[in-house]
Image: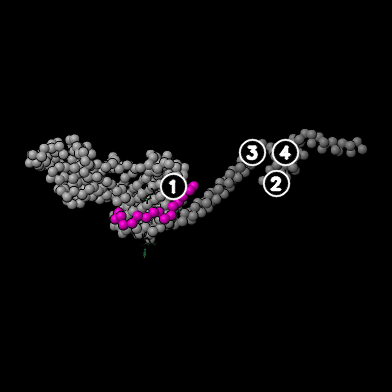
């Protein structure tokens, strides 16, 4: 590039023409990508002294009276550059809250009528790798409460302590977590009961300290309240049935901000109360723009059913808690009692039939074969009597017994 401190003083017109031509040919945004086009301006005296304030997300440099235009860019590591164009006399750029913990590259270009200045600042996360907290997440629940959790860094020293700071997007206030949830002395969670300071997007900074020499890296994250809110259960669930279907209705759950119906998604869990194990019906998805109602097809007589509903943001689909179980239909117990009664009757009938059959069979056996003395038939006493009466005459019973009976009169004969 012909311009720079070493360029001949006699050719400013040529320079200007070239610059104009270049600026017409090249997309200015392209010039601010990380790879500089052409060799960087060889400046023996760094003129801008660009510096970055991470808390204010501000890139500033030494002001130049003769600046004609300036431009700056912030590129998160592995991300797309964000380009800002400050006003002519401004010598700073304020960036939106951006996650910085992976490191960012900042660039500024200031043009004067004479030359173009360009400087880069690399901002890195101070501290040792793996010491930062990780798995950071937050949940807003019951409208007014927020819980955040994280895990200690794998390389963090034993005495590490973490601190959470929350800043609203207007940067009006930054506050530290008022109530940590410690685990073995280390803060690994935060519970907030006053969310009035939160805006739609919020900057969360989790830094740490240790008495050991290791410096603890920070973790930062931008979370929108809409994305992290878990809705409570839908209110006022009601069910009304006619002969063929049941209409289930509910009210939109309470949320931090008033939302339109179509920003909700619902899930209905409708189950038969005495469903066989493994016979659960699938969940029913109902879009919020259908007016918070669902026609459940169910004709009379209908068994007892249980309904529960939960809600989520239609985009984030983070499901909230289930509503209290509501029942409809008639209790199954009536029909099961009837079944029990029928079973008892059937059982009695079968037993009676069985006994009758046995009795008949016994009678047939009796007529075919003469009875054996060992058989004691409790069912027919009269029959036993007849058998006892005829035994002596039959003479075909137990031979020994018959013999002893016959021997009795013998001594009297001998007398
Ligand atoms: C500064 O000048 C260079 C070269 O003339 C041009 O490509 C660039 O777009 C200018 N930058 C700004 C911020 O106007
Ligand atoms: C952190 O999250 C990852 C992936 O989400 C998971 O595999 C890991 O078990 C989590 N670690 C802790 C300590 O919770
Ligand atoms: C939030 O944290 C509080 C205090 O640690 C705890 O009692 C509560 O159960 C947590 N709630 C949720 C939804 O995580
Ligand atoms: C909640 O915090 C705000 C400031 O963030 C404060 O003005 C307000 O009084 C607090 N409310 C309660 C109930 O503590
Ligand atoms: C953590 O960040 C807060 C807010 O920027 C700051 O006040 C505090 O000194 C920092 N703590 C450590 C240990 O770096
Ligand atoms: C529930 O219904 C009652 C009566 O219709 C109404 O006053 C109340 O506001 C409803 N609750 C919600 C959360 O919509
Ligand atoms: C029951 O309600 C549904 C939905 O409102 C309706 O389509 C159906 O005709 C009604 N059936 C009877 C028998 O009233």
Q: Is mark 2 within 8 Å of ligand 7?
A: no
* Residue 385 seen: yes
Dot 4 falls on a residue whose secondary structure is loop
- How far apart marks 4 and 3 lie (CA) works out to 14 Å
Q: CA distance from mark 4 to mark 2?
A: 14 Å
For the residue pair 305 and 404, the one nearer the viewer reads as: 305
Determine the secondary structure under disc 2: helix
Badge 3 element:
helix
The residue singled out by tag 3 in the image is 365
Q: Residues within 10 Å of mark 1 (few under 14, many from 20)?
A: many
Q: Which mark is residue 381?
A: 2
Q: Which residue is mark 1?
A: 161
| Real-space CA distance between mark 1 and mark 3, rounded to the nearest whole angstrom | 95 Å
Specify few, some or many for label 2: CA neighbours under 10 Å numbering under 14, 14-19, or 20 or more. few
Q: Is residue 80 above or below residue 342?
A: above
Q: Give the class, few, some or many, for how many residues have Cα within 10 Å of label 3's Cα (few <14, many ≥20).
A: few
In 3D space, how far apart are the residues under numbered discs 2 and 3 (Cα atoms)? 16 Å
- The outermost residue toward the right is 415
In this picture, which residue range is highlighted in magenta? 169-186
Distance Cα–Cα, label 4 vs label 1 = 97 Å
């Amino acid at each position: 590039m012909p311009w720079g401190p070493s360029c001949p003083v006699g050719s400013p017109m040529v320079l200007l023409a070239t610059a104009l031509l270049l600026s017409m040919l090249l997309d200015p945004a392209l010039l601010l990508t990380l790879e500089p086009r052409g060799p960087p301006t060889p400046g023996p005296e760094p003129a801008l002294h660009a510096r970055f304030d991470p808390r204010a997300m501000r890139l500033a440099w030494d002001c130049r009276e003769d600046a004609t235009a300036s431009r700056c860019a912030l590129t998160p590591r592995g991300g797309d550059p964000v380009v800002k164009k400050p006003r002519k006399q401004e010598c700073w750029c304020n960036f939106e809250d951006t996650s910085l913990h992976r490191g960012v590259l900042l660039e500024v270009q200031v043009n004067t009528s004479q030359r173009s200045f360009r400087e880069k600042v690399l901002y890195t996360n101070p501290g040792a790798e793996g010491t930062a907290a990780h798995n950071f997440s937050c949940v807003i629940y019951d409208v007014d409460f927020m819980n955040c959790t994280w895990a200690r860094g794998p390389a963090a020293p034993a005495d590490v302590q973490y601190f959470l700071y929350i800043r609203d997007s207007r940067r009006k206030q930054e506050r530290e977590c008022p109530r940590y949830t410690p685990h073995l002395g280390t803060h690994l969670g935060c519970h907030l009961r006053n969310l009035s300071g939160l805006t739609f997007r919020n900057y969360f900074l989790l830094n740490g300290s240790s008495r050991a020499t290791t410096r603890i890296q920070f973790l930062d994250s931008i979370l929108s309240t809409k994305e992290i809110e878990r809705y409570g259960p839908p209110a006022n669930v009601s069910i009304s049935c006619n002969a063929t279907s049941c209409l289930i209705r509910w009210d939109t759950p309470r949320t931090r901000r008033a939302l339109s119906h179509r920003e909700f998604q619902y899930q209905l869990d409708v189950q038969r109360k005495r469903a066989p194990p493994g016979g659960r019906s699938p969940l029913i998805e109902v879009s919020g723009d259908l007016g918070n109602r669902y026609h459940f097809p169910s004709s009379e007589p209908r068994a007892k059913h249980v309904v529960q509903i939960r809600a989520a943001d239609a985009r984030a689909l983070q499901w909230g808690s289930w509503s209290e179980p509501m029942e409809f239909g008639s209790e199954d117990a009536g029909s099961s009692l009837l079944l029990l009664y029928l079973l008892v009757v059937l059982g009695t009938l079968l037993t009676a039939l069985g006994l009758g059959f046995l009795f008949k069979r016994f009678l047939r056996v009796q007529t075919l074969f003469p009875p054996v003395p060992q058989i004691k038939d409790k069912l027919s006493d009269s029959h036993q009597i007849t058998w006892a009466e005829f035994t002596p005459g039959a003479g075909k019973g137990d031979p020994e017994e018959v013999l002893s009976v016959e021997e009795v009169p013998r001594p009297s004969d001998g007398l």
